[in-house]
């Protein structure tokens, strides 16, 4: 629609390079206000013709107004904008480009620029294209340019010293096995590892718990011989896990008698398969969790000293100063730090007890300091599995995007560092997002402190709405965003949280 509108406007000779400055809808007045910028002199007839075009594109139920301003940029203005564009779109290049590296010349119908870089390549050709696109949105006229290799710039490069975090290993927790009795094994294990800590590779590890599910499946070998494969889901109150087991003929009758609710001890082999721990039992015996068992608190690795894969960025939202009518912030907002986060995942299974745990594919998080959104932490995450068509359609995230992203093992240490010492905030976070964070942090040895606020119950207690979906609450506060993307959802949740706390004037009880 925008391109077709500009196509019609640019048929007027004095507006042949015009751009749209803004389109504003004033609901109270049923008014659409369109502002154009041109770099050429125009007449009243030209303006009248442009207004007729605006009228043709605006629905009948709205009145419309047109404002035209003339702007002829100079070389200095264009050069300043080029530096801004590089700073916003390419932090790596911005570190080496100064005002002296940008040269702009006036041409017959616009401007031509060069940007001096360390080494010009096909990659920097994309940078030039990005700059041209941004300039055309800000100024009238045609723009072209390129990045050029600047001799001597390599001498100015300072190689930053690489910092490495100290690597820690946290021993898995164990408990003593009660009521042990042999079924088919030959040894008598004394202790079992917590299933919640079963995230490592081992040739022989012992777990103990209650059977919650059994499946029997005949398997035919390549030689034509049939064997019985069993799948047990076992829970020890810390977590559940699925264990595969090939039944031995000599103990088959006893295995067939096992049922849901029985307590067993499994001596297992663990290995990583498609990014998941796969557990196979070598022996099954009888045994149970000790009476009155209370899991000990999980120990956490220390907070990493350095970010290694995902680096937070300073965030500046110029609308923060005027988006909200009431700018006074309660002390509880100014005296605490919050990380507002959202995830996109491969599906809805947020617990390994429900089968194969779904994976995180995107993290979006914003840090609220002194009542303002000041830092961002955003990244895609490689789930090491294929995305469903449903998830691709819902999020707009495709397989190629996540295949090139870091895995959760690389991302979660950095995210744990980012949230250290902060309250966590999310929309439906208590029932969904936090479970993923807790699980995948634990897989890396980190234990997040559960200081969590959920904006759904908070909004339910303060607002009267038809429902409390994120877009409904955002509409209530007049906030627009791109739904079902973690970064956008997290940012709008941060704005909603600030608004809700301004109404409540105190923090709710953490979830």
Image (cartoon, rainbow, N blue to C red):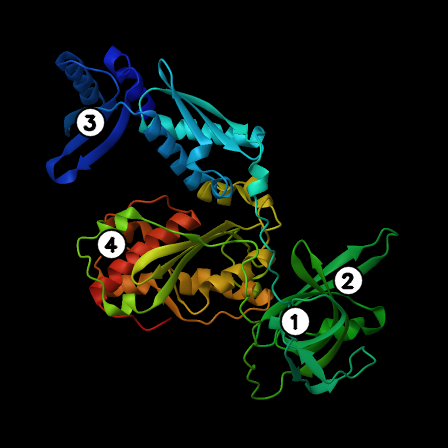
Q: Examine the image and state in which quarter residue 445 appears.
A: bottom right
* CA–CA distance in space, label 4 to label 3: 28 Å
Figure check: 312 above or below 233: above
Which one is in front in this view, the residue at disc 1 or the one at disc 3?
Answer: 1
Q: Examine the image and state in which quarter residue 218 appears.
A: bottom right
Estimate the x, y position of residue 496 in percent, counting from the top left.
Answer: 29, 56
- Kindly identify which residue carries mark 1: 169
- Kindly identify which residue carries mark 4: 466
Estimate the x, y position of residue 280 in percent, counting from the top left.
Answer: 74, 65
Q: Secondary structure at mark 1?
A: loop
- Kindly identify which residue carries mark 2: 228
Say if residue 12 shows up in the picture: no
Is 181 or 474 nearer to us in this picture? 474
Q: Quick one: label 2 or label 4, which is nearer the N terminus?
A: 2
* CA–CA distance in space, label 2 to label 1: 38 Å
Say if residue 103 shows up in the picture: yes
């Amino acid at each position: 629609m925008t391109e077709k509108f500009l196509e019609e406007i640019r048929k007027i000779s004095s507006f042949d390079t015009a751009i749209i400055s803004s389109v504003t809808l004033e609901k109270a007045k049923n008014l659409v206000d369109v502002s154009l910028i041109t770099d050429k002199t125009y007449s009243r007839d030209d303006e009248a013709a442009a207004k007729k075009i605006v009228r043709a594109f605006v629905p009948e139920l709205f009145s419309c107004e047109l404002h035209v301003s003339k702007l002829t940029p100079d070389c200095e203005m264009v050069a300043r904008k080029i530096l801004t564009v590089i700073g916003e779109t390419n932090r790596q290049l911005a570190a080496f480009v100064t005002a002296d590296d940008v040269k702009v010349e006036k041409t017959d119908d616009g401007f031509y620029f060069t940007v001096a870089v360390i080494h010009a390549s096909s990659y920097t050709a994309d940078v030039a294209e990005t700059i041209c696109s941004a300039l055309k949105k800000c100024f009238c006229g045609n723009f072209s340019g390129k990045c050029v290799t600047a001799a001597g710039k390599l001498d100015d490069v300072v190689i930053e010293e690489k910092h490495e975090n100290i690597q820690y290993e946290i021993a898995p927790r164990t408990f003593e096995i009660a009521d042990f009795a042999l079924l088919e094994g030959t040894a008598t294990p004394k202790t079992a590892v917590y299933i919640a800590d079963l995230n490592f590779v081992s040739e022989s590890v012992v777990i103990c718990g209650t059977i919650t599910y059994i499946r029997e499946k005949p398997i035919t070998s390549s030689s034509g011989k049939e064997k019985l494969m069993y799948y047990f889901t076992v829970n020890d109150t810390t977590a559940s896990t699925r264990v595969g087991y090939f039944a031995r003929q000599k103990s088959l009758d006893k295995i067939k008698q096992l049922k849901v609710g029985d307590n067993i001890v499994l001596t297992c082999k663990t290995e990583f398969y498609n990014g998941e721990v796969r557990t196979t039992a070598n022996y099954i015996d009888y045994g149970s969790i000790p009476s009155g068992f209370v899991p000990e608190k999980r120990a956490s690795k220390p907070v990493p000293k350095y970010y290694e894969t995902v680096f937070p960025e300073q965030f500046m939202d110029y609308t923060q100063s005027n988006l909200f009518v009431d700018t006074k912030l309660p002390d509880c907002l100014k005296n605490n730090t919050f990380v507002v986060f959202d995830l996109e995942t491969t599906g809805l299974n947020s617990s390994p007890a429900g089968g194969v745990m779904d994976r995180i594919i995107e993290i979006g998080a914003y840090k609220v300091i002194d009542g303002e959104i000041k830092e961002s932490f955003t990244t895609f995450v490689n789930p090491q599995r294929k995305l469903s068509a449903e998830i691709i359609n819902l999020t707009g995230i495709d397989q190629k995007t996540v295949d090139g992203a870091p895995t959760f093992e690389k991302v979660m240490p950095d995210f744990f560092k980012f949230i250290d010492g902060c309250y966590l905030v999310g929309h439906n976070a208590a029932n969904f997002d936090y479970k993923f964070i807790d699980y995948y942090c634990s897989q890396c040895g980190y234990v997040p402190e559960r200081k969590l606020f959920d904006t759904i119950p908070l909004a339910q207690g303060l607002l009267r709405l038809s429902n409390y979906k994120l877009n409904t609450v955002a509409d209530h506060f007049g906030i627009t965003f791109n739904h079902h993307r973690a970064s956008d959802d997290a940012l709008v949740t941060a704005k909603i949280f600030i608004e809700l706390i301004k109404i409540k004037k105190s923090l709710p009880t953490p979830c």
